[in-house]
Image (tube, grey):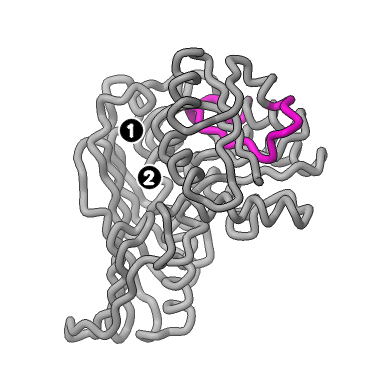
Amino acid sequence: MFKIGFLGAGTIASKVAETIMKLEDFQVYAVASRSEERAGEFAKKYHAVKIYTDYVELASDPDVDLIYISTPHSHHAEHAKLCINGGKPCLVEKAFSYNRATAKEVLDLAREKKVFCGEALWSRYNPSWLLIKQLIDQRFLGKLTNITVNIGYDIKKNERIVEPELAGGALLDIGIYPLAFAGYICGENVPQIVSAAGKFATGVDAFDTMICMFKNGVSAYATATTMYGTDRTATLFCESGYIKVTEFTCPVAIDVYSKDNELVQHFDAAPNQISGYEYEFKSAQAAIEHGYIEPVEMPHKDTLELMTTMDKLRAAWGIKYPME
């Protein structure tokens, strides 16, 4: 049994725990939260064996095989270092940290200590993304020319979104997804970007518009908003047609159209998929068993490149976090 420890017991941790409970040979084993009440409720609901209110104790538990970190972006690096120094492999929820410098510190430490550490950018592990990339790379519809992709949720009242002290803003929370998608498809995570952002009164970004230009000549128009929900669709336009991806972060359908708008082929989501969160944990388990310090699907290089791009975007928008 592969035992997962949860560092943080919020909404995303609950979604992941629900998945782990349904995943064969995996166990929700331990949870750590600053709130003993929250940790207790989490443990009761997801059948965790151990409860901690001290993160150091979780990182010192000899029975934990992997720690999943889902605290605010502002604390990811601190908590990842704690785990790595304790010799514990960890998956860090996206965005990996609040800037490239702190992310690099963590990944350098993982390399020095020879401890697995990966970014839990769940979409990158999804087999549907691999299928889309294969369709593009094999030029099923000819050469890719441009991409449009949007993401939006009404989360404007969430503290973690609006507070600079928590490294809030649309970019790190959801804007990372369209950037990651376009970069993954084009094989480059540091494109040239023209962008604009609207801000909350707190100074962090509420919505973002990004036009990316990649070295292969492909352009991508990406938007992210915390103000309202969108259809979260990605469309990849090619010489002989286009590919439409429904709910692109965890695709439920991939539809291939001719240039005359006729449906050529339809793909459903992976038939045995639980929620989509399982893939990153299977990847981490396999990497740890092979002695790797990074996930195959989301190497450290890509994490740093994404952080580089987001640093550049925030600099262009005049957004700096208090801890920087």
In front of the other: 246 or 258? 246
- At label 2, the amino acid type is Gly
Range of magenta residues: 59-78
* Residue at 53 percent of width and 66 percent of height: 187
* Residue at 61 percent of width and 30 percent of height: 77
Please say if the residues under marks 2 and 1 sit with CB atoms less than 8 Å apart.
Answer: yes
Q: Nearer the viewer, mark 2 or mark 1?
A: 2
Q: Position of residue 171 (x, y in %)?
A: 39, 40
Q: Which residue is mark 2?
A: 175
Q: Position of residue 293 (x, y in %)?
A: 73, 49
The secondary element bearing badge 1 is classed as strand
The image quadrant that residue 313 belongs to is: top left
- Whether 214 is among the magenta residues is no
Residue 243 visible to the viewer: yes
Q: Residues within 10 Å of mark 2 (few under 14, many from 20)?
A: many
Numbered tag placed on residue 205 in the rendering = 1
- At label 1, the amino acid type is Asp
User: Is 47 located above or below residue 239 in the figure?
Assistant: above
